[in-house]
Image (cartoon, rainbow, N blue to C red):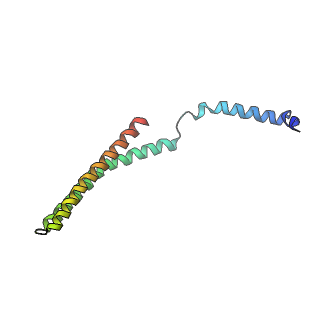
Amino acid sequence: MLRKIKESRTVNLAIMFSVFMLLAATPASASQPQLVTGATKLGGDLFTWLLVLIPVYAIVMFAWHAWMKSMAEGEGAEVAARNKSMKRVIIFSAIAEGASGLVKLLLAYFV
């Protein structure tokens, strides 16, 4: 039975066709698909927007906490809480800006 399958003309033709298609398809798959290049561009644009929006958000939040701090004159706990919030806004925005810039740099370098 196995010998009959090996000698079958249909099986031999299918194997030769498969090998030919594998060899012929290699140069055709050398370029990147449009989905990959589009996703790369989308990621680059997203991180460009983040590089703009993170400092704007940080300035607005810092100004908000500074204004609320000025409204809470004489309340030590409230002033300390607003000072802590302003410090957190600066730290988190610096971390976010650095991470976004690093990812944008890696996308531009490797892709």
Residue 111 rendering spot, x and y as whole percentages: 44, 37
Residue at x 46%, y 45% (from the top left corner): 39
- 89 sits left or right of 43 in the view: left
Residue 5 rendering spot, x and y as whole percentages: 85, 37
Q: Depth check: give the residue in front, 25 or 64.
A: 64
Q: Identify the image quadrant of residue 78.
A: bottom left
Please identify the residue farthest to the left as the structure is shown: 74
Residue at x 50%, y 42% (from the top left corner): 36
- 99 sits left or right of 91 in the view: right
- 11 sits left or right of 83 in the view: right
Which quadrant of the rendered structure holds the N terminus? top right
Residue at x 17%, y 67% (from the top left corner): 77
Identify whether 18 is placed above or below 54. above
Residue 86 rendering spot, x and y as whole percentages: 21, 58
- 100 sits left or right of 3 in the view: left
Q: Identify the image quadrant of residue 61.
A: bottom left
Q: How many marks?
A: 0
